[in-house]
Every structure is written in structure tokens, then in C-alpha cells.
Image (cartoon, rainbow, N blue to C red):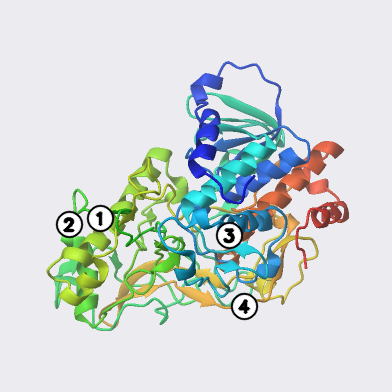
């Protein structure tokens, strides 16, 4: 393959596979697949590719029809922490991106020499490691497509039937049922969804929300109180009519924290889209005022500006070709805090239609945020002029209104198995004796709620405890269920970890690493005819090292 990839050519070739619908395959009499991967995110791709490279018949179930999850949906500033953890297919992915940008033809909207080359703690395009940690979404998707095509992985477009989707006999899954009724049979299953959607039907224990600090002797879990990072300015009145409690609280503001600092709760850290913007003339689509726009939804924004906030409403982290990875930053930004859970529900418990409605609310919130900063008269002229040059990129997400395909589901279900990764493992204060990959990123949680604190609106839940780039091992036991629950399932993302440990492990590079390792273990279990719990770690370790995975 040449250094400069043609995304449209590769996507067109993949389209034939993605057009296989649930109804089209319903009547096929096919032998079971060896490895069934549910979830088209980055770790699902590496899992399917590794299984195929190990000679197994692999199938990848794609919920969105676009491969890569967040890594091809706007998260172009990779959260790595330490490049030394990258090996195997994860390193191959970032290396292919690096090779792409060595071709002058890849620089279509700016001169290569004009790109600042700033990444997150490392050069965006690093000649020493030959890795690209910053990249355009469409280029990332083309790399994932190429990996799948080269490996000969079958891709099926479909979504799990969330009510009766897991077919199980004894302690083994025999197939998964998609919407429309088609059943995909297999010998081993990998749940690579951000939601851990196979866990309930497989009878596997899981949790949501935050554990109390006391449960696993942690310091960064549970309710945090109003910490200073990504916090609102002082002085924001919490009531609809300022100074009048009888008028009620502003939308999304709770009367109190719901517990003491360190206590457990049910809440999820905030989601957002990793918004991609551009100021390149000829490639810029203006951001329009969303339908059903309601300026009352932005009252906290207006009051934050009145309280002195002048900038930092979202990030402008630059990817090549004048595009941004515009993530959340500050106290009022792209995160729709509290928008992913409610009374008796959270994102994980919703059906697909319910998730689509919540995702639409997040999309409209962010588009409305940009439109408000550009046009609303309550926003000072200087701030409006700072934001006006930016719009959506015409050459990205072309069949989705130039908006990312995937909402950033930062956390939903987390499996609870015989081994739980905790803050103390991430800090290397407790040993991990069976590592299958490494993490190194900050112990990270976005804000979880807004509440009234000393008569003002404050955010709660933001944690950013740095590990100094020091890597830690991630246990094989954390990606497999208890043997009494399921013998042929591996879970490389919604793995067994506490809220705060998961805040570091959940990063996309680690997802790719763990997807690779999960597939390796699945193939070894097939060859041995054994449950995944009985895969000998030493044998697994040697194979992972042979495939260039980094375990220490």
C-alpha cells in the first residue's frame, strides 16, 4: 500500500461488506465463525484483525457502518500518556498514519511546513518514533478500513437486539441476535462496544457509576466535591430568576451533591462529541442555529461570561489540514453534564432509539453552543468575532451532515470479574502479575453533575490525577468474566475496573492494545478447546511479545 492512502477508494471497497444487512443474512446456512467481535470501534477492529491474522474466521459487527469509533469520529489528538506503551496493532495504526502524512499529497488544505506539529505531550508527527498521534478522522477511518480489508475480515452492518441478543447454552455464548432477527454464531465472542452491551445477556456481572473510595482503598473515586479544574467562575446564581429561589433551579442544576465527598453514587461522567471544526475557506460549512434552539439552555454560559469568562469554551487543538479536535474544556463547554443519566436510567440501560435521542441532544447542545458564541447578542462582540471563522469541515463525515458518527461514551457499564483494576494498580502500588498491555494516561474523569454550592452553581466530578507518564500493566483477568458466568467472552473496553482506574484505561490507544490481546487469547482458547479463563498466561505472554505487544 502506498504511503498516501485514498480514503474514498478504500471506503468504497469496504462499502460492499457494510451493505450486508441483518435481513440479508438471516437465512444463510453458514458454519459458525471462530471469533465474533461486536463493536466497530478501534479495539473491535484490532481484535478482528488479530483473530484473522492468527488464521481464524473472524467477523466484525459494525453498529455505525464506519470503522474506528472515536478514533475516526474526531478524537484526533490521541490520549496516550507514554508512547512506549504502543505495540502490536496499536503501534501499526499510528505508524500508518505517520506514513500517510509523509506524502506531500496528503497536505491538501495547508502546507506541511505550516503545520505546528503540536500533539499531546509529544510531536504530532514524531520522526523519532515514526508515530502520528494527531490526525484527521477520514484518514484514520481509511487506515482501519485497510487493516480490515487486508486481513480478510467479514464485516456485517447491524446492532444487537438489546432484549434478546445474547444466545447462551450453559456457560457459553453460542450466538448473538441482531435487530431484524439474524443470528451470528461463533466459538468466541469479544464485546468491543463502548457500552458493554453483551454483558447483561451473557449473565456477566457489571456496575455503573462511581464506587466509594473506601471500597477499594482509593483516593480519586466517588463524589469529589467542587474541585478547581474545569470549574465554573464564582458568582453564578443557580435560579431561573436570579436571587429568587421560588423561580426554581436552572436546567441541569441539582440542589446538592447527593452525598459526602468519597461516597459512591449512580452518576456517569459527561459525554460529548469530539467536535471537528475548520477555518479553511472552501472547506468550511457554517454552523447553523439548531432546530428547537432554546436560549434558556445556555443561561449558565451567559452568566459565566458575565462573571468574567472570556475564552476557553472549547479546545482548538489542531490536526493537519486546518481541522480541530475541539474537546471539552473549562466549566461550561461541549460536555452536556448530566445529560447521560436520569431517574432510573442511564445511557447503558437505554435501547438504541433512546440512545439516538440522547445523542441528538448532545449534538444540538454543541451546535447551539457554537452558534451562540458566534451570533447571540448576550455574547460580547469580541468573543463572537473570535469564534466566527470556524465551521464544520466539508470533507469530513460527508454522509452525516459533517458531524462525527460517534458520541464520546466515556463510561457506561464496567464488568466486575475476579480481578478489578483500581487506582492502586494504575499507580503501581499494587502488582499486576498477568499484564496483556499497558496504560499510562492520567487518572481522568470529566464532570458528573452541577449543583448548588454556597449559593452558586458549581461542577462536580472532574478528576485529573497525573501519573507522570509512568506506565502500568493491565491484567488479563480484568478482561475476562468469572468462569461461573461465561467461558467464551472477552471484554477489552468495558473491562473490570473502578471508575477512576477506568478513567485512565479507557483511552483509545489502550483500547486497541487490549483488543489485540483479547483476540490473541480467544484464538488460543479455541486451539486448546478451553475456556478463556484457562488460557495459560505464560503462553499468552510469549505470543503477545512475539507480536510486538509491550508488557513492561
Q: Nearer the viewer's eye, disc 3 or disc 2? A: 3
Contact flag, marks 3 and 4 (Cβ < 8 Å): no
Q: Between label 2 and label 1, give the one nearer the viewer.
A: 1
Q: Which residue is drawn at 75% across and 41% down?
A: 53
- Closer to the camera: disc 1 or disc 3? 3
Asked whether 71 or 420 is in front, the reply is 71
Earlier along the polypeptide chain: callout 3 or callout 4?
3
**Could you say where residue 8 lies in the image, as x and y percent from the top left?**
48, 40
User: Residues under labels 1 and 3: Cα distance?
Assistant: 32 Å
The residue where tag 2 is placed is 294
Labels 2 and 1: the sequence-earlier one: 1
Q: Is residue 337 left or right of residue 534?
A: left
- State how far apart marks 3 and 2 are (Cα): 46 Å
Whether the residues at callouts 3 and 2 have beta carbons within 8 Å, the answer is no
Could you tell me residue 59's position as x and y percent? 64, 34
Q: In x, y percent, where is residue 541?
A: 83, 56
| Residue contact between numbered discs 1 and 3, judged by CB atoms under 8 Å | no
The crowd level at tag 2 (other Cα within 10 Å; few <14, some 14-19, many 20+) is few
Query: In 3D space, how far apart are the residues under numbered discs 2 and 1 (Cα atoms)?
Result: 16 Å
Rounded to the nearest angstrom, the CA distance separating label 3 from label 4 is 32 Å
- Location of the C terminus by quadrant is bottom right
Gap between marks 2 and 4, in whole Å? 41 Å
Query: x, y percentage for residue 358?
Result: 35, 49
Tell me the residue that label 3 is attached to.
Answer: 102
Residue identified by numbered label 1: 287
In the picture shown, does residue 236 fall above or below 158?
below
Local SS, label 4:
loop
Amino acid at each position: 500500500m502506498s504511503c498516501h492512502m485514498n480514503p474514498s477508494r478504500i471506503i468504497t471497497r469496504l462499502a460492499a461488506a457494510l451493505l450486508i444487512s441483518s435481513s440479508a443474512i438471516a437465512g444463510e446456512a453458514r458454519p459458525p465463525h471462530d471469533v465474533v467481535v461486536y463493536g466497530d470501534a478501534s479495539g473491535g477492529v484490532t481484535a478482528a484483525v488479530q483473530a484473522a491474522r492468527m488464521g481464524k474466521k473472524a467477523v466484525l459487527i459494525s453498529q455505525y457502518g464506519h470503522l474506528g469509533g472515536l478514533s475516526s469520529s474526531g478524537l484526533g489528538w490521541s490520549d496516550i500518556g507514554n508512547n512506549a506503551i504502543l505495540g502490536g496493532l496499536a503501534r501499526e495504526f499510528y505508524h500508518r498514519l505517520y506514513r500517510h502524512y509523509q506524502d506531500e499529497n496528503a497536505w491538501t488544505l495547508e502546507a506541511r511546513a505550516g503545520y505546528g506539529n503540536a500533539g499531546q505531550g509529544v510531536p504530532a508527527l514524531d520522526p523519532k518514533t515514526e508515530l502520528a498521534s494527531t490526525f484527521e478522522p477520514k484518514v484514520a477511518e481509511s487506515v482501519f478500513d485497510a487493516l480490515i480489508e487486508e486481513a480478510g475480515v467479514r464485516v456485517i452492518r447491524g446492532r444487537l437486539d438489546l432484549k434478546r441478543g445474547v444466545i447462551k447454552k450453559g456457560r457459553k455464548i453460542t450466538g448473538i441476535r441482531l435487530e431484524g432477527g439474524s443470528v451470528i454464531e461463533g466459538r468466541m465472542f469479544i464485546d468491543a462496544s463502548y457500552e458493554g452491551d453483551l454483558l447483561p445477556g451473557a449473565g456477566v456481572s457489571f456496575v455503573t457509576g462511581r464506587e466509594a473510595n473506601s471500597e477499594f482503598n482509593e483516593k480519586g473515586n466517588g463524589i469529589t466535591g467542587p474541585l478547581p479544574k474545569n470549574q465554573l467562575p464564582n458568582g453564578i446564581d443557580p435560579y431561573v430568576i436570579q436571587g429568587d429561589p421560588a423561580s426554581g433551579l436552572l436546567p441541569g442544576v441539582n440542589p446538592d451533591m447527593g452525598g459526602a465527598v468519597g461516597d459512591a453514587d449512580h452518576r456517569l461522567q459527561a459525554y460529548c462529541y469530539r467536535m471537528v471544526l475548520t477555518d479553511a475557506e472552501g472547506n468550511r460549512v457554517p454552523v447553523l442555529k439548531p432546530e428547537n434552539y432554546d436560549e434558556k439552555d445556555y443561561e449558565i454560559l451567559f452568566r459565566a461570561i458575565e462573571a468574567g469568562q472570556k475564552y476557553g469554551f472549547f479546545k482548538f487543538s489542531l490536526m493537519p489540514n486546518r481541522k480541530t479536535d475541539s474537546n471539552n474544556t473549562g466549566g461550561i463547554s461541549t460536555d452536556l453534564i448530566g445529560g447521560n443519566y436520569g431517574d432510573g436510567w442511564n445511557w447503558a440501560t437505554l435501547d438504541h432509539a433512546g440512545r439516538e435521542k440522547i445523542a441528538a441532544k448532545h449534538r444540538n447542545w454543541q451546535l447551539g453552543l457554537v452558534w451562540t458564541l458566534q451570533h447571540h447578542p448576550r455574547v460580547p462582540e469580541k468573543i463572537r468575532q473570535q469564534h466566527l471563522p470556524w465551521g464544520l469541515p466539508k470533507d469530513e463525515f460527508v454522509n452525516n451532515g459533517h458531524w462525527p458518527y460517534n458520541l464520546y461514551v466515556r463510561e457506561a457499564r464496567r464488568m466486575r470479574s475476579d480481578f478489578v483494576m483500581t487506582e492502586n494498580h494504575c499507580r503501581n502500588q499494587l502488582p499486576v502479575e498477568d499484564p496483556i498491555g499497558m496504560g499510562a494516561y492520567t487518572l481522568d474523569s470529566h464532570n458528573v453533575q452541577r449543583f448548588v454550592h454556597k449559593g452558586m452553581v458549581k461542577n462536580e466530578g472532574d478528576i485529573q490525577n497525573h501519573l507522570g507518564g509512568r506506565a502500568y500493566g493491565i491484567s488479563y483477568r480484568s478482561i475476562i468474566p468469572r468462569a461461573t458466568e461465561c467461558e467464551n467472552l472477552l471484554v477489552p473496553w468495558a473491562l473490570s475496573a473502578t471508575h477512576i482506574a477506568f478513567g485512565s484505561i479507557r483511552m483509545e490507544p489502550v483500547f486497541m492494545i487490549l483488543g489485540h490481546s483479547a483476540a490473541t487469547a480467544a484464538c488460543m482458547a479455541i486451539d486448546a478447546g478451553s475456556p478463556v479463563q484457562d488460557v495459560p498466561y505464560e503462553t499468552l505472554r510469549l505470543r503477545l511479545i512475539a507480536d510486538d505487544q509491550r508488557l513492561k
